[in-house]
């Protein structure tokens, strides 16, 4: 059990779970649940974390690990560690202009920030706020002209990588959102309760409700002019998310995007091969943080088969349940080239803004360093499945022992 789930925090947050607890105290319930929750019974969301917890590292001692290297290259970009801030929609509702704050923290840490299509701050605002151009995440919409316009906007601010999210053909049910009245029908009483939830968090009201304006969707201003209610957003999602998209549409994306192209939301090895055949540069093994189809495998379980299927023909990234640098090392050992953090940074920005994200990333980097040293490795590039403990696998035959 994580300390912050059971006991009050001490003076300073030490882990992603501590930021979660701070975010829980600070945010209106509906927003905290929106970040924290998953689809249906949340089985997949929990197993993302649990399967990583169950994976064990292999401790190897008395090797010279005095010089250790976390810097790496992912999709043509140098980064200080193999960590990327995943696209998180509506983030500007968690803290004032939160996408801009997080992008600055990512740039300071030397890693990429991925701007979600459904962000509060538009791509231009995020690019202007940070010395490094953000990567851009795109949902394919029925209005292809609008999607083309978004790719042009991302390109104009110098985004080097387009992350095309492909696991949202339809939207999985998130029961917490329904209970909180931000999904489904909302009666007048639900709207009143939602309003009371917001105003009973005065710090949030000051920071976001007043200081964070305008609370519109910066990338979708023309498509969703009224972003003041969840209903308007939901109507847009229902009308625009396109379940008819196929692998053939990758060619259309390629026509409009000159940079690197990554598809996010692959779990199946055959899909991974299709992605390679469609000519993508990278694949993110992801189940959307357990927010789409429940009862699918955790990403830690799905990753090795995808890595084997891709056979080095594209870069394989992964997200889901990663809460620490030790988790990052485990995912690298399973074959990922880099790891995206979702909730970990959403909680940190909600709790302490840019400073929270910076501190959380410092901790992740420090964890990676220790895990490298104590698994007997000196570089993230050296990590392979041998860094994981497998009962019996490293045992010395009795005759030579
Ligand atoms: C609050 C929230 C909003 C998200 N919004 C998006 C989004 O707009 N686009 C997208 O591709 N993924 C989105 N995701 C999924 C993340 O990019 C990522 O796949 C997931 O959070 C990884 O799991 P983790 O949160 O356990 O780290 C969102 C996740 C959360 C928690």
Image (cartoon, rainbow, N blue to C red):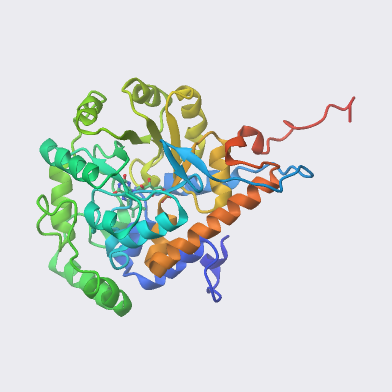
Horizontally, residue 289 falls left or right of residue 249, namely: right
**For the point 9% across and 56% down, which residue is it?**
225
Residue 155, position in %: x, y? 23, 42
**For the point 52% across and 59% down, which residue is it?**
362
**For the point 17% across and 60% down, which residue is it?**
216
* Res. 351 visible in picture: no
* Res. 290 visible in picture: yes
> Within the image, what quadrant is residue 97 found in?
bottom left
Q: Quadrant of the N terminus?
A: bottom right
Tag count: 0
From this viewpoint, which residue is outermost toward the top? 277
Residue 286, position in %: x, y? 40, 39
Asked whether 350 or 5 is in front, the reply is 350
> Within the image, what quadrant is residue 104 found in?
bottom left
Asked whether 63 or 169 is in front, the reply is 63
Residue 171, position in %: x, y? 25, 43
In the displayed structure, would residue 339 be above or below residue 396?
Answer: below
**For the point 49% across and 44% down, which residue is it?**
82
Residue 9, position in %: x, y? 53, 73
> Within the image, what quadrant is residue 135 found in?
top left
Q: Quadrant of the C terminus?
A: top right
Asked whether 106 or 368 is in front, the reply is 106
Horizontally, residue 190 falls left or right of residue 303, namely: left
């Amino acid at each position: 059990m994580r300390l912050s789930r059971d006991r009050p925090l001490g003076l300073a947050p030490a882990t992603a779970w501590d930021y979660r607890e701070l975010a829980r105290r600070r945010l209106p319930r509906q927003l905290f649940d929106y970040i924290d929750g998953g689809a249906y019974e949340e089985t997949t969301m929990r197993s993302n974390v649990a399967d990583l917890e169950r994976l064990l590292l292999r401790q190897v001692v008395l090797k010279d690990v005095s010089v250790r290297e976390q810097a790496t290259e992912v999709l043509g970009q140098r980064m200080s560690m193999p960590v990327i801030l995943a696209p998180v929609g509506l983030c500007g509702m968690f803290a004032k202009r939160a996408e801009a704050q997080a992008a600055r923290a990512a740039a300071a840490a030397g890693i990429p920030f991925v701007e979600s299509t459904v962000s509060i701050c538009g791509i231009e605002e995020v690019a202007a706020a940070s010395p490094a151009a953000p990567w851009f995440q795109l949902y394919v919409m029925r209005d292809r002209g609008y999607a083309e316009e978004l790719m042009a906007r991302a390109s104009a601010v110098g985004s080097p990588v387009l992350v095309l999210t492909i696991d949202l053909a339809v939207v999985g049910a998130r029961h917490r959102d329904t209970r909180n009245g931000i999904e489904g029908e909302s009666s007048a009483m639900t709207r009143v309760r939602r309003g009371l939830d917001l105003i009973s968090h005065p710090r949030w009201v000051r920071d976001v409700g007043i200081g964070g304006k305008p609370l519109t969707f910066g990338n979708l201003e023309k498509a969703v002019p009224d972003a003041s209610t969840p209903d308007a957003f939901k109507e847009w999602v229902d009308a625009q998310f396109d379940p008819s998209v196929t692998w053939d549409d990758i060619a259309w994306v390629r026509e409009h995007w000159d940079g690197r192209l990554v598809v996010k939301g692959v779990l199946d090895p055959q899909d991974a091969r299709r992605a390679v055949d469609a000519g993508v540069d990278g694949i993110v093994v992801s189940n959307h943080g357990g927010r789409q189809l429940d009862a699918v495998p955790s990403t830690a379980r799905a990753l090795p088969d995808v890595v084997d299927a891709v056979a080095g023909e594209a870069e394989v990234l992964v997200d889901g349940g990663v809460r620490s640098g030790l988790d990052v090392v485990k995912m690298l050992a399973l074959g990922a080239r880099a790891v995206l953090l979702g909730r970990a940074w959403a909680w940190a920005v909600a709790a302490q803004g840019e400073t929270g994200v910076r501190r959380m990333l410092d901790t992740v980097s420090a964890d990676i360093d220790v895990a490298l040293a104590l698994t007997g490795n000196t570089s993230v590039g050296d990590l392979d499945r041998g860094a994981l403990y497998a009962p019996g696998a490293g045992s010395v035959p009795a005759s030579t022992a």
